[in-house]
Image (cartoon, rainbow, N blue to C red):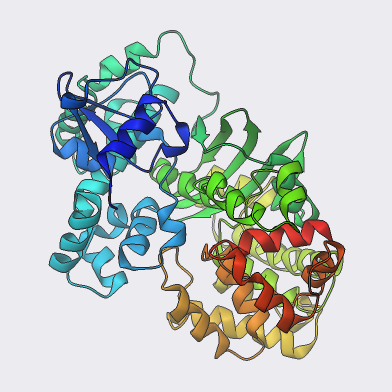
Amino acid sequence: MEMDFERCYRAVDSRDQRFDGWFYTGVTSTGIYCRPSCPAITPKRQNVRFFPSAAAAQGAGLRACRRCRPDAAPGSPLWDVRADVVGRAMRLIADGVVDRAGVPGLASRLGYTERHLHRMLSAEMGAGPLALARAQRAQTARILIETTDLAMAEIAFAAGFGSVRQFNDTLREVYASAPSDLRTARGRQQAPAGAGTIALRLAYRPPLHARALLDFLAVRALPGVEEVRDGTYHRGLRLPHGTGQVALTPAEGHVAATLRLADLRDLAPAVARCRRLLDLDADPAAIDATLAADPALTPTVTVEPGIRVPRSVDAFELAVRAIIGQQVSVRSAKTTLTRLLTTAHTRVDHEVVATDDGVSGQQLHDQRGGLRGFLSPEELLSVPDSGFGMPVGRREALRGLARGVVDGSVDLAAGVDREEAVRRLLTLPGIGPWTANYLAMRAFGDPDVLLSSDLAVRRGAAALGLPDTQRSLDRYAERWRPWRSYATIRLWRAA
Protein backbone atom coordinates (compact mmCIF):
# COMPACT_ATOMS: atom_id res chain seq x y z
CA MET A 1 0.00 0.00 0.00
CA GLU A 2 1.13 3.59 -0.57
CA MET A 3 1.95 5.41 2.65
CA ASP A 4 2.17 9.17 2.60
CA PHE A 5 4.51 10.22 5.41
CA GLU A 6 2.56 13.34 6.41
CA ARG A 7 -0.78 11.55 6.54
CA CYS A 8 0.67 8.66 8.54
CA TYR A 9 2.46 11.00 10.94
CA ARG A 10 -0.74 12.99 11.56
CA ALA A 11 -2.53 9.74 12.40
CA VAL A 12 0.23 8.86 14.88
CA ASP A 13 0.25 12.36 16.38
CA SER A 14 -3.53 12.19 16.97
CA ARG A 15 -3.34 8.55 18.14
CA ASP A 16 -6.10 7.68 15.68
CA GLN A 17 -7.01 4.03 16.27
CA ARG A 18 -8.85 3.83 12.94
CA PHE A 19 -5.43 3.37 11.34
CA ASP A 20 -4.36 0.44 13.56
CA GLY A 21 -3.50 -2.42 11.23
CA TRP A 22 -3.27 -0.16 8.16
CA PHE A 23 0.40 0.55 8.89
CA TYR A 24 2.99 0.31 11.69
CA THR A 25 5.18 3.03 13.15
CA GLY A 26 8.87 2.25 13.54
CA VAL A 27 10.85 4.38 15.97
CA THR A 28 14.54 4.17 15.13
CA SER A 29 15.71 5.91 18.32
CA THR A 30 14.16 3.23 20.57
CA GLY A 31 14.24 0.25 18.20
CA ILE A 32 10.54 -0.52 18.59
CA TYR A 33 7.48 -0.49 16.34
CA CYS A 34 3.98 0.53 17.45
CA ARG A 35 0.36 0.91 16.43
CA PRO A 36 -0.59 4.40 15.22
CA SER A 37 -2.74 4.74 18.35
CA CYS A 38 0.08 3.92 20.79
CA PRO A 39 -0.36 6.15 23.91
CA ALA A 40 3.39 6.81 24.19
CA ILE A 41 4.82 10.26 23.47
CA THR A 42 4.79 10.99 19.73
CA PRO A 43 8.31 10.40 18.36
CA LYS A 44 10.20 13.05 16.43
CA ARG A 45 9.75 13.02 12.67
CA GLN A 46 13.37 12.25 11.98
CA ASN A 47 13.13 9.10 14.12
CA VAL A 48 10.05 7.64 12.42
CA ARG A 49 9.64 5.11 9.63
CA PHE A 50 6.35 3.58 8.47
CA PHE A 51 5.88 -0.07 7.52
CA PRO A 52 2.99 -1.86 5.76
CA SER A 53 3.18 -4.93 8.03
CA ALA A 54 4.51 -6.08 11.39
CA ALA A 55 6.75 -8.52 9.52
CA ALA A 56 8.35 -5.64 7.59
CA ALA A 57 9.06 -3.79 10.84
CA GLN A 58 10.56 -6.93 12.35
CA GLY A 59 12.67 -7.40 9.23
CA ALA A 60 14.09 -3.92 9.82
CA GLY A 61 15.32 -5.06 13.22
CA LEU A 62 12.58 -3.46 15.34
CA ARG A 63 10.81 -5.18 18.24
CA ALA A 64 7.14 -4.98 19.16
CA CYS A 65 6.08 -2.31 21.66
CA ARG A 66 5.00 -3.94 24.93
CA ARG A 67 2.59 -1.12 25.66
CA CYS A 68 0.34 -1.06 22.58
CA ARG A 69 0.91 -4.66 21.35
CA PRO A 70 1.06 -3.80 17.62
CA ASP A 71 1.16 -7.48 16.65
CA ALA A 72 -2.38 -7.83 18.03
CA ALA A 73 -3.84 -4.92 16.02
CA PRO A 74 -6.85 -5.52 13.72
CA GLY A 75 -5.92 -6.78 10.27
CA SER A 76 -5.87 -4.43 7.33
CA PRO A 77 -9.31 -3.96 5.72
CA LEU A 78 -7.54 -3.98 2.37
CA TRP A 79 -7.73 -7.77 2.27
CA ASP A 80 -11.52 -7.58 2.27
CA VAL A 81 -11.69 -5.03 -0.53
CA ARG A 82 -8.94 -6.50 -2.65
CA ALA A 83 -9.47 -9.82 -4.39
CA ASP A 84 -6.03 -9.93 -6.04
CA VAL A 85 -3.23 -12.44 -5.37
CA VAL A 86 -1.73 -10.46 -2.49
CA GLY A 87 -5.10 -10.19 -0.75
CA ARG A 88 -5.74 -13.91 -1.23
CA ALA A 89 -2.26 -14.75 0.03
CA MET A 90 -2.75 -12.69 3.19
CA ARG A 91 -6.02 -14.47 3.96
CA LEU A 92 -4.41 -17.89 3.46
CA ILE A 93 -1.39 -17.00 5.61
CA ALA A 94 -3.75 -15.87 8.39
CA ASP A 95 -5.54 -19.22 8.10
CA GLY A 96 -2.23 -21.03 8.73
CA VAL A 97 -1.59 -22.44 5.25
CA VAL A 98 2.16 -21.71 5.42
CA ASP A 99 2.42 -23.50 8.77
CA ARG A 100 0.63 -26.55 7.38
CA ALA A 101 1.90 -26.71 3.80
CA GLY A 102 4.88 -24.35 3.69
CA VAL A 103 5.51 -21.64 1.12
CA PRO A 104 5.35 -24.20 -1.74
CA GLY A 105 1.83 -25.14 -0.61
CA LEU A 106 0.79 -21.48 -0.50
CA ALA A 107 2.23 -20.80 -3.94
CA SER A 108 0.51 -23.88 -5.37
CA ARG A 109 -2.86 -22.79 -3.96
CA LEU A 110 -2.47 -19.39 -5.63
CA GLY A 111 -1.12 -20.73 -8.94
CA TYR A 112 2.19 -18.84 -8.87
CA THR A 113 5.82 -19.78 -8.43
CA GLU A 114 7.36 -19.27 -4.99
CA ARG A 115 9.76 -16.70 -6.39
CA HIS A 116 7.04 -14.59 -8.02
CA LEU A 117 4.82 -14.80 -4.93
CA HIS A 118 7.73 -13.65 -2.76
CA ARG A 119 8.34 -10.75 -5.12
CA MET A 120 4.69 -9.62 -5.04
CA LEU A 121 4.34 -9.84 -1.25
CA SER A 122 7.68 -8.11 -0.65
CA ALA A 123 6.66 -5.23 -2.92
CA GLU A 124 3.28 -4.77 -1.20
CA MET A 125 3.95 -5.86 2.39
CA GLY A 126 7.68 -5.29 2.81
CA ALA A 127 8.15 -8.98 3.65
CA GLY A 128 7.86 -12.35 1.95
CA PRO A 129 5.41 -15.14 2.84
CA LEU A 130 7.80 -16.87 5.26
CA ALA A 131 8.46 -13.66 7.19
CA LEU A 132 4.73 -12.88 7.33
CA ALA A 133 4.00 -16.38 8.65
CA ARG A 134 6.88 -16.06 11.13
CA ALA A 135 5.38 -12.85 12.54
CA GLN A 136 2.07 -14.65 13.00
CA ARG A 137 3.82 -17.57 14.75
CA ALA A 138 5.47 -15.15 17.16
CA GLN A 139 2.10 -13.63 18.06
CA THR A 140 0.54 -17.10 18.50
CA ALA A 141 3.43 -18.11 20.75
CA ARG A 142 3.05 -14.97 22.89
CA ILE A 143 -0.67 -15.68 23.35
CA LEU A 144 0.05 -19.25 24.44
CA ILE A 145 2.82 -18.14 26.81
CA GLU A 146 0.60 -15.55 28.46
CA THR A 147 -2.66 -17.52 28.59
CA THR A 148 -1.59 -21.12 29.28
CA ASP A 149 0.75 -23.02 31.57
CA LEU A 150 2.10 -25.20 28.78
CA ALA A 151 5.79 -26.03 28.65
CA MET A 152 7.78 -23.88 26.25
CA ALA A 153 8.59 -26.82 23.98
CA GLU A 154 4.86 -27.58 23.60
CA ILE A 155 4.17 -23.93 22.80
CA ALA A 156 6.94 -23.84 20.21
CA PHE A 157 5.46 -26.65 18.13
CA ALA A 158 1.84 -25.58 18.72
CA ALA A 159 2.69 -22.13 17.33
CA GLY A 160 4.15 -23.67 14.19
CA PHE A 161 7.89 -23.39 14.84
CA GLY A 162 10.13 -26.14 13.49
CA SER A 163 12.35 -26.28 16.58
CA VAL A 164 12.65 -24.90 20.11
CA ARG A 165 15.77 -23.03 19.08
CA GLN A 166 13.91 -21.28 16.25
CA PHE A 167 11.13 -20.44 18.72
CA ASN A 168 13.58 -18.93 21.25
CA ASP A 169 15.50 -16.93 18.64
CA THR A 170 12.33 -15.52 17.06
CA LEU A 171 10.76 -14.39 20.32
CA ARG A 172 13.99 -12.76 21.48
CA GLU A 173 14.19 -10.92 18.17
CA VAL A 174 10.53 -9.85 18.02
CA TYR A 175 9.93 -9.02 21.68
CA ALA A 176 13.50 -8.46 22.95
CA SER A 177 12.70 -11.00 25.68
CA ALA A 178 13.24 -14.66 26.32
CA PRO A 179 10.00 -16.71 26.30
CA SER A 180 10.32 -17.31 30.05
CA ASP A 181 10.51 -13.54 30.64
CA LEU A 182 7.22 -13.04 28.77
CA ARG A 183 5.58 -15.53 31.11
CA THR A 184 7.10 -13.85 34.16
CA ALA A 185 5.74 -10.50 32.93
CA ARG A 186 2.27 -12.05 33.02
CA GLY A 187 2.54 -11.77 36.79
CA ARG A 188 0.07 -13.67 38.90
CA GLN A 189 -2.58 -13.90 36.22
CA GLN A 190 -3.84 -17.48 36.09
CA ALA A 191 -4.18 -19.38 32.86
CA PRO A 192 -7.76 -20.37 31.93
CA ALA A 193 -8.98 -23.61 33.45
CA GLY A 194 -8.96 -26.72 31.31
CA ALA A 195 -6.51 -28.25 28.88
CA GLY A 196 -6.56 -26.54 25.51
CA THR A 197 -8.49 -23.50 26.82
CA ILE A 198 -7.24 -20.07 25.72
CA ALA A 199 -8.70 -16.65 26.52
CA LEU A 200 -7.75 -13.66 24.38
CA ARG A 201 -9.02 -10.35 23.03
CA LEU A 202 -9.86 -9.78 19.37
CA ALA A 203 -9.33 -6.13 18.48
CA TYR A 204 -11.55 -4.22 16.06
CA ARG A 205 -11.94 -0.70 14.68
CA PRO A 206 -14.86 1.01 16.40
CA PRO A 207 -17.73 1.40 16.15
CA LEU A 208 -19.06 -2.16 16.24
CA HIS A 209 -22.82 -2.72 16.28
CA ALA A 210 -22.63 -5.93 18.31
CA ARG A 211 -26.38 -6.34 18.77
CA ALA A 212 -26.95 -6.51 15.01
CA LEU A 213 -24.35 -9.26 14.70
CA LEU A 214 -25.75 -11.29 17.59
CA ASP A 215 -29.34 -10.82 16.37
CA PHE A 216 -28.43 -12.11 12.91
CA LEU A 217 -26.57 -15.15 14.29
CA ALA A 218 -29.19 -15.94 16.95
CA VAL A 219 -32.06 -16.20 14.45
CA ARG A 220 -30.08 -18.68 12.35
CA ALA A 221 -28.39 -20.62 15.19
CA LEU A 222 -28.46 -24.41 14.69
CA PRO A 223 -28.98 -26.58 17.80
CA GLY A 224 -25.85 -28.56 18.67
CA VAL A 225 -23.65 -26.30 16.52
CA GLU A 226 -24.17 -22.76 17.84
CA GLU A 227 -26.19 -20.65 20.25
CA VAL A 228 -26.44 -17.08 21.51
CA ARG A 229 -26.82 -16.84 25.28
CA ASP A 230 -26.50 -13.84 27.62
CA GLY A 231 -24.82 -11.65 25.01
CA THR A 232 -22.28 -14.33 24.04
CA TYR A 233 -22.11 -16.33 20.82
CA HIS A 234 -21.05 -19.96 21.30
CA ARG A 235 -20.27 -22.43 18.54
CA GLY A 236 -18.40 -25.58 17.64
CA LEU A 237 -15.54 -25.47 15.17
CA ARG A 238 -14.10 -27.87 12.63
CA LEU A 239 -10.41 -26.97 12.26
CA PRO A 240 -7.44 -28.30 10.24
CA HIS A 241 -6.03 -30.44 13.07
CA GLY A 242 -9.12 -31.23 15.12
CA THR A 243 -12.23 -29.85 16.74
CA GLY A 244 -12.85 -26.82 18.94
CA GLN A 245 -15.39 -24.60 20.61
CA VAL A 246 -15.45 -20.82 20.98
CA ALA A 247 -17.37 -18.29 23.04
CA LEU A 248 -17.35 -14.72 21.66
CA THR A 249 -18.50 -11.79 23.81
CA PRO A 250 -18.43 -8.27 22.29
CA ALA A 251 -17.01 -5.66 24.67
CA GLU A 252 -15.74 -2.09 24.50
CA GLY A 253 -12.83 -2.00 22.05
CA HIS A 254 -12.52 -5.77 21.68
CA VAL A 255 -14.32 -9.09 21.49
CA ALA A 256 -13.47 -11.45 24.35
CA ALA A 257 -12.82 -14.94 22.96
CA THR A 258 -12.51 -18.17 24.93
CA LEU A 259 -11.32 -21.05 22.79
CA ARG A 260 -11.23 -24.74 23.64
CA LEU A 261 -9.07 -26.59 21.14
CA ALA A 262 -8.37 -30.29 20.77
CA ASP A 263 -5.04 -29.36 19.10
CA LEU A 264 -3.30 -26.07 19.94
CA ARG A 265 -1.81 -25.90 16.45
CA ASP A 266 -5.29 -24.71 15.43
CA LEU A 267 -5.06 -21.48 17.44
CA ALA A 268 -4.11 -19.20 14.51
CA PRO A 269 -6.74 -20.66 12.12
CA ALA A 270 -9.40 -20.47 14.86
CA VAL A 271 -8.61 -16.81 15.57
CA ALA A 272 -8.63 -15.97 11.85
CA ARG A 273 -12.01 -17.64 11.38
CA CYS A 274 -13.56 -15.93 14.41
CA ARG A 275 -12.33 -12.56 13.15
CA ARG A 276 -13.78 -13.37 9.74
CA LEU A 277 -17.12 -14.46 11.23
CA LEU A 278 -17.60 -11.12 13.01
CA ASP A 279 -16.01 -9.02 10.23
CA LEU A 280 -13.58 -7.51 12.74
CA ASP A 281 -11.07 -6.22 10.18
CA ALA A 282 -13.59 -3.93 8.47
CA ASP A 283 -13.18 -0.15 8.39
CA PRO A 284 -16.61 1.05 9.62
CA ALA A 285 -15.71 4.73 9.34
CA ALA A 286 -15.08 4.43 5.58
CA ILE A 287 -18.12 2.20 5.04
CA ASP A 288 -20.53 4.37 7.00
CA ALA A 289 -19.25 7.55 5.39
CA THR A 290 -20.06 6.20 1.91
CA LEU A 291 -23.50 4.88 2.86
CA ALA A 292 -24.45 7.95 4.92
CA ALA A 293 -23.85 10.12 1.84
CA ASP A 294 -27.16 8.71 0.55
CA PRO A 295 -29.97 10.62 2.32
CA ALA A 296 -32.12 7.47 2.30
CA LEU A 297 -29.55 5.60 4.41
CA THR A 298 -28.36 8.50 6.57
CA PRO A 299 -30.89 7.85 9.39
CA THR A 300 -30.00 4.13 9.65
CA VAL A 301 -26.25 4.88 9.72
CA THR A 302 -26.77 7.56 12.37
CA VAL A 303 -28.87 5.29 14.59
CA GLU A 304 -26.87 2.10 13.98
CA PRO A 305 -23.22 2.91 13.19
CA GLY A 306 -20.73 0.10 12.71
CA ILE A 307 -22.99 -2.52 11.09
CA ARG A 308 -20.85 -5.48 9.94
CA VAL A 309 -21.46 -8.33 7.51
CA PRO A 310 -21.83 -11.58 9.50
CA ARG A 311 -19.60 -14.02 7.67
CA SER A 312 -18.74 -17.64 8.44
CA VAL A 313 -16.16 -19.93 10.00
CA ASP A 314 -16.85 -22.66 7.43
CA ALA A 315 -17.61 -21.87 3.78
CA PHE A 316 -18.98 -25.36 3.12
CA GLU A 317 -21.41 -24.94 6.01
CA LEU A 318 -22.60 -21.62 4.61
CA ALA A 319 -22.99 -23.12 1.13
CA VAL A 320 -25.21 -25.88 2.53
CA ARG A 321 -27.25 -23.29 4.46
CA ALA A 322 -27.62 -21.14 1.33
CA ILE A 323 -28.85 -24.03 -0.85
CA ILE A 324 -31.38 -25.15 1.76
CA GLY A 325 -32.45 -21.54 2.32
CA GLN A 326 -33.35 -20.90 -1.32
CA GLN A 327 -36.92 -19.63 -1.62
CA VAL A 328 -37.89 -20.62 1.94
CA SER A 329 -38.08 -18.70 5.20
CA VAL A 330 -35.21 -18.60 7.69
CA ARG A 331 -37.32 -20.61 10.16
CA SER A 332 -38.13 -23.31 7.59
CA ALA A 333 -34.48 -23.58 6.52
CA LYS A 334 -33.41 -23.90 10.16
CA THR A 335 -35.89 -26.76 10.72
CA THR A 336 -34.61 -28.64 7.66
CA LEU A 337 -30.97 -28.10 8.65
CA THR A 338 -31.62 -29.30 12.19
CA ARG A 339 -33.18 -32.53 10.88
CA LEU A 340 -30.22 -33.10 8.54
CA LEU A 341 -27.69 -32.51 11.32
CA THR A 342 -29.52 -34.79 13.74
CA THR A 343 -29.50 -37.64 11.23
CA ALA A 344 -25.86 -37.18 10.25
CA HIS A 345 -24.52 -36.76 13.79
CA THR A 346 -26.47 -39.79 15.04
CA ARG A 347 -24.88 -41.92 12.31
CA VAL A 348 -21.38 -40.61 13.10
CA ASP A 349 -21.76 -41.20 16.84
CA HIS A 350 -22.98 -44.76 16.34
CA GLU A 351 -20.14 -45.53 13.92
CA VAL A 352 -17.49 -44.11 16.28
CA VAL A 353 -18.76 -45.98 19.34
CA ALA A 354 -19.20 -49.25 17.43
CA THR A 355 -15.94 -49.30 15.47
CA ASP A 356 -13.24 -47.19 17.11
CA ASP A 357 -12.15 -47.68 20.71
CA GLY A 358 -9.15 -45.43 20.15
CA VAL A 359 -11.03 -42.14 19.79
CA SER A 360 -9.72 -39.40 22.09
CA GLY A 361 -11.71 -38.08 25.02
CA GLN A 362 -11.97 -34.65 23.36
CA GLN A 363 -13.37 -36.16 20.17
CA LEU A 364 -15.93 -38.25 22.05
CA HIS A 365 -17.00 -35.19 24.03
CA ASP A 366 -17.60 -33.27 20.80
CA GLN A 367 -19.51 -36.19 19.25
CA ARG A 368 -21.69 -37.15 22.24
CA GLY A 369 -22.57 -33.76 23.66
CA GLY A 370 -21.90 -30.03 23.62
CA LEU A 371 -21.37 -27.89 20.54
CA ARG A 372 -19.46 -29.19 17.56
CA GLY A 373 -18.58 -28.17 14.05
CA PHE A 374 -20.92 -28.47 11.08
CA LEU A 375 -20.95 -31.53 8.83
CA SER A 376 -17.95 -32.23 6.64
CA PRO A 377 -18.58 -32.89 2.93
CA GLU A 378 -17.82 -36.58 3.52
CA GLU A 379 -20.37 -36.80 6.34
CA LEU A 380 -23.04 -35.14 4.22
CA LEU A 381 -22.45 -37.64 1.42
CA SER A 382 -23.02 -40.50 3.86
CA VAL A 383 -26.51 -39.29 4.84
CA PRO A 384 -29.28 -41.47 3.31
CA ASP A 385 -32.03 -39.97 1.19
CA SER A 386 -34.48 -40.12 4.09
CA GLY A 387 -32.26 -37.90 6.23
CA PHE A 388 -32.51 -34.82 4.00
CA GLY A 389 -36.21 -34.01 4.27
CA MET A 390 -36.25 -31.81 1.18
CA PRO A 391 -37.07 -31.99 -2.55
CA VAL A 392 -34.91 -34.30 -4.65
CA GLY A 393 -33.40 -31.44 -6.66
CA ARG A 394 -32.19 -29.66 -3.54
CA ARG A 395 -30.84 -32.87 -2.04
CA GLU A 396 -28.84 -33.61 -5.18
CA ALA A 397 -27.59 -30.01 -5.28
CA LEU A 398 -26.13 -30.54 -1.80
CA ARG A 399 -24.53 -33.80 -2.84
CA GLY A 400 -23.12 -32.21 -5.99
CA LEU A 401 -21.57 -29.45 -3.92
CA ALA A 402 -20.10 -31.94 -1.43
CA ARG A 403 -18.63 -34.09 -4.22
CA GLY A 404 -17.09 -31.00 -5.81
CA VAL A 405 -15.41 -30.01 -2.53
CA VAL A 406 -14.14 -33.56 -1.94
CA ASP A 407 -12.68 -33.98 -5.45
CA GLY A 408 -11.27 -30.44 -5.52
CA SER A 409 -13.33 -29.10 -8.42
CA VAL A 410 -15.02 -26.61 -6.05
CA ASP A 411 -12.72 -24.46 -3.92
CA LEU A 412 -14.26 -22.77 -0.88
CA ALA A 413 -11.02 -21.90 0.95
CA ALA A 414 -10.33 -18.53 2.56
CA GLY A 415 -8.01 -17.42 -0.25
CA VAL A 416 -10.18 -18.49 -3.15
CA ASP A 417 -10.40 -16.33 -6.27
CA ARG A 418 -13.88 -14.86 -5.71
CA GLU A 419 -14.86 -14.47 -9.35
CA GLU A 420 -13.64 -17.95 -10.28
CA ALA A 421 -15.42 -19.47 -7.27
CA VAL A 422 -18.72 -17.84 -8.25
CA ARG A 423 -18.32 -19.05 -11.85
CA ARG A 424 -17.72 -22.63 -10.72
CA LEU A 425 -20.62 -22.57 -8.28
CA LEU A 426 -22.96 -21.44 -11.05
CA THR A 427 -22.05 -24.53 -13.08
CA LEU A 428 -23.40 -26.81 -10.34
CA PRO A 429 -27.04 -27.98 -10.66
CA GLY A 430 -29.34 -26.26 -8.17
CA ILE A 431 -27.10 -23.21 -7.55
CA GLY A 432 -28.25 -19.94 -9.06
CA PRO A 433 -27.08 -16.31 -8.91
CA TRP A 434 -28.66 -15.58 -5.49
CA THR A 435 -26.88 -18.53 -3.83
CA ALA A 436 -23.52 -17.81 -5.49
CA ASN A 437 -23.65 -14.11 -4.62
CA TYR A 438 -24.78 -14.86 -1.05
CA LEU A 439 -21.64 -17.00 -0.70
CA ALA A 440 -19.50 -14.28 -2.27
CA MET A 441 -20.74 -11.88 0.39
CA ARG A 442 -20.66 -14.06 3.51
CA ALA A 443 -18.19 -16.88 2.74
CA PHE A 444 -15.67 -15.19 0.44
CA GLY A 445 -15.80 -11.75 2.07
CA ASP A 446 -16.72 -9.68 -0.99
CA PRO A 447 -17.75 -6.26 0.44
CA ASP A 448 -19.59 -5.18 -2.72
CA VAL A 449 -22.46 -7.62 -3.27
CA LEU A 450 -26.07 -6.43 -3.52
CA LEU A 451 -28.65 -9.23 -3.31
CA SER A 452 -31.21 -7.23 -5.26
CA SER A 453 -33.25 -10.33 -6.19
CA ASP A 454 -33.83 -11.08 -2.49
CA LEU A 455 -37.41 -10.37 -1.42
CA ALA A 456 -36.41 -9.12 2.05
CA VAL A 457 -33.83 -6.76 0.50
CA ARG A 458 -36.48 -5.28 -1.78
CA ARG A 459 -38.90 -4.95 1.14
CA GLY A 460 -36.22 -3.11 3.09
CA ALA A 461 -35.61 -0.82 0.13
CA ALA A 462 -39.33 -0.03 -0.06
CA ALA A 463 -39.42 0.68 3.68
CA LEU A 464 -36.67 3.28 3.21
CA GLY A 465 -38.34 4.85 0.17
CA LEU A 466 -35.86 3.37 -2.30
CA PRO A 467 -36.59 1.69 -5.67
CA ASP A 468 -37.83 -1.82 -4.94
CA THR A 469 -37.62 -3.65 -8.25
CA GLN A 470 -34.45 -5.62 -8.96
CA ARG A 471 -33.34 -3.62 -11.99
CA SER A 472 -34.08 -0.19 -10.51
CA LEU A 473 -32.44 -1.09 -7.19
CA ASP A 474 -29.32 -2.30 -9.01
CA ARG A 475 -29.04 1.04 -10.80
CA TYR A 476 -29.65 3.05 -7.65
CA ALA A 477 -27.12 1.05 -5.61
CA GLU A 478 -24.19 2.06 -7.80
CA ARG A 479 -23.70 4.99 -5.40
CA TRP A 480 -23.01 2.54 -2.55
CA ARG A 481 -19.94 0.97 -4.17
CA PRO A 482 -17.68 -0.60 -2.94
CA TRP A 483 -19.79 -1.34 0.18
CA ARG A 484 -23.01 -2.81 -1.23
CA SER A 485 -22.73 -5.89 1.03
CA TYR A 486 -23.09 -3.60 4.05
CA ALA A 487 -26.03 -1.87 2.40
CA THR A 488 -27.62 -5.31 1.94
CA ILE A 489 -27.39 -5.97 5.69
CA ARG A 490 -28.98 -2.58 6.41
CA LEU A 491 -31.81 -3.26 3.95
CA TRP A 492 -32.44 -6.63 5.63
CA ARG A 493 -32.66 -4.85 8.99
CA ALA A 494 -35.01 -2.24 7.55
CA ALA A 495 -37.31 -5.04 6.34
- In this view, 372 is above or below 233: below
Q: Which residue is drawn at 64% across and 53% down?
A: 367
Instruction: In this rendered view, identify the residue nearer to me: 135 or 377.
Output: 135
Q: Is residue 42 left or right of residue 447?
A: left
Q: Can residue 468 be seen in this view?
A: yes
Residue farthest top in this picture: 188
Q: Looking at the image, which residue is at 33% across and 54% down?
A: 93
> Residue 12's x, y, as percent?
35, 29
Residue 400 lies left or right of residue 10; in this view the side is: right
Residue 111 picture quarter = bottom left
Whether 56 is drawn above or below 331: the answer is: above
Residue beneath the point at 59% across and 86% down: 400
Using the image as rendered, state which of residue 131 and residue 295 is in the foreground. Answer: 295
Q: Tell me where residue 336 appears, x and y as whole percent.
A: 81, 70
**Vertical position of residue 302 compared to residue 89: above or below:** above
Of 404 and 231, the residue lying toward us: 231
Viewer-proximal residue among 392 and 494 = 494
Q: How many labels does the image show?
A: 0
Name the residue: 51% across, 51% down: 273
Quadrant (top left, top right, bottom left, bottom right) of the C terminus: bottom right
Q: Left or right of 186: which side holds 138?
A: left
Residue 138 picture location, percent across and down: 28, 35
Quadrant in the picture for residue 56: top left
Residue 468 rendering spot, x and y as whole percentages: 81, 75
In the picture, measured across the screen, residue 330 lies left or right of residue 382, that is right
